[in-house]
Amino acid sequence: MAAEVWTARARAAARDRRRRLEHLQAYLFIAPALLLIGVFHVLPGLAALAISLTRWGVIYERFAGLENYAAILDPSGARFGEFVNALGVTAWYVLMTVPVEMAIALLLAFVLYQGTVGRGAYRVVYVMPYITSVVAAATIFEWIFDANFGILNEALGVVGIGAQAWLREPRGIFQMLGAAAGLGVPDALAGPGLSLVAVSIFTVWHFVGFQTIVFLAGLTSISRELYEAARIDGANERQILRRITIPLLSPAIFFVAIIASVGAMRSFNQIYVLTNGGPLDTTRTVPLLIFHTFFERTAVNGIGLGSAMSFIFVLIIVAFTVVQFRVLGRRVFYG
């Protein structure tokens, strides 16, 4: 009996040693990633938080506490107006990109899922924009949207539509459409500027391939037996789409909605290359405002104010994401 007890304890001790060794190996495998995240994300974030609590001129001046946050959130201050305007531009940008990207990606994924001839080649074509450098692609689109020599205006001229300023046009798109129809549209209802619409077109073109791949992966994971059973029971294609495809695809839709929304709110590269926030700040999103405040206003505490803006914006993104989880998360079906 004593020998059996000793053997059981030895086996248990061996299992514990193996388990500890496996845990150690796991931590060693993720250590490089944790190191990179810590050095390039966590530490800079903590440094930015510390800077947001200080006042800077050309050099560090003093500890300011929450003064920078108060200056940005003071409704009577100029910083508040700038920040609210940038938030409005960001909201328009998200609304013009995320739903359009998702709708086009869903359509493309359904087409590719139906067994289209040469769909492997189509997948490559759709994903190529996503793996292309944003800066390089935006530079090409800057030429496409050129008001004088752009190929887009050449194409519009062929169909009888006059040339547009595109990236240089600050007027709202609704105002422009109203003027074309002979209707007066007040400034409050002018809508996003045509320049922001142009940037949104590029964004949709660049990111729709990634979302198509995600949706296509979600579609291929749905068992075809479910479709066969539904058709045997007399369900039509609309009922199959509503009762089977959409519910089982909802995790992919939810994932794309979260990723695309956060990505659009944080967009910087394409906007900086195409317009740098102009004209007349009609494409100056919050990331552009933070960048300009931080790097171009160092003589008036731009470093502290820019850091404070970034943390306020982070809280807004987190709040928006939480709302998405609360509203959309409960509609996700994990079958």
Image (tube, grey):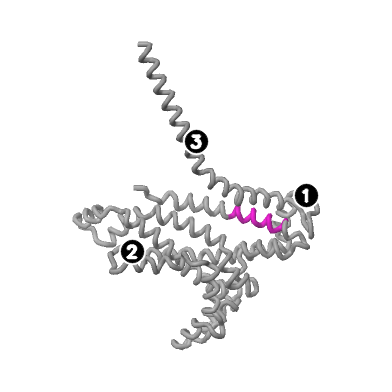
Residue flagged by tag 3: what amino acid is it? Leu
The image shows residue 93, relative to residue 335, as above or below, that is below
Residue assigned mark 2: 110
Query: Could you say where residue 34 lies in the image, as x and y percent from the top left?
Result: 55, 45
* Sequence-earlier tag: 3 or 1: 3
Q: Amino acid at mark 2?
A: Phe
> Which label belongs to residue 63?
1
Local crowd size for mark 2, using a 10 Å CA cut-off: few (<14), some (14–19), many (≥20):
some
Image-based side of 297 in relation to 252, left or right:
right
What residue is drawn where x is 50% and y is 84%?
A: 153
- Quarter occupied by residue 183: bottom right
Q: Is residue 175 magenta?
A: no
- Find the distance from the CA under tag 3 to the CA under tag 1: 42 Å
Judging from the image, what secondary structure is the residue with disc 2 in? helix
List x then y, in percent, for residue 152: 49, 81
**Residue 310: % across, % down:** 64, 56
* Mark toward the start of the polypeptide (2 vs 3): 3
Marks 2 and 3 sit apart, C-alpha to C-alpha, by 44 Å
- Residue contact at pointers 3 and 1, CB within 8 angstroms: no
Classify residue 313 as left or right of residue 98.
right
Mark 3 secondary-structure assignment:
helix
| Mark nearer the viewer, 2 or 3 | 3
Residue found at the very far top of the displayed protein: 1
In the displayed structure image, the side of residue 89 where residue 58 appears, left or right = right
Q: Which residue is mark 3?
A: 24
Query: Which quadrant of the figure contains the N terminus?
Result: top left
Magenta stretch mostly in which secondary structure? Answer: helix
Q: Earlier in the sequence, mark 2 or mark 1?
A: 1
Spatial CA span between label 2 and label 1:
56 Å
The residue that appears at 66% across and 57% down in the rendered structure is 309
Range drawn in magenta? 304-316
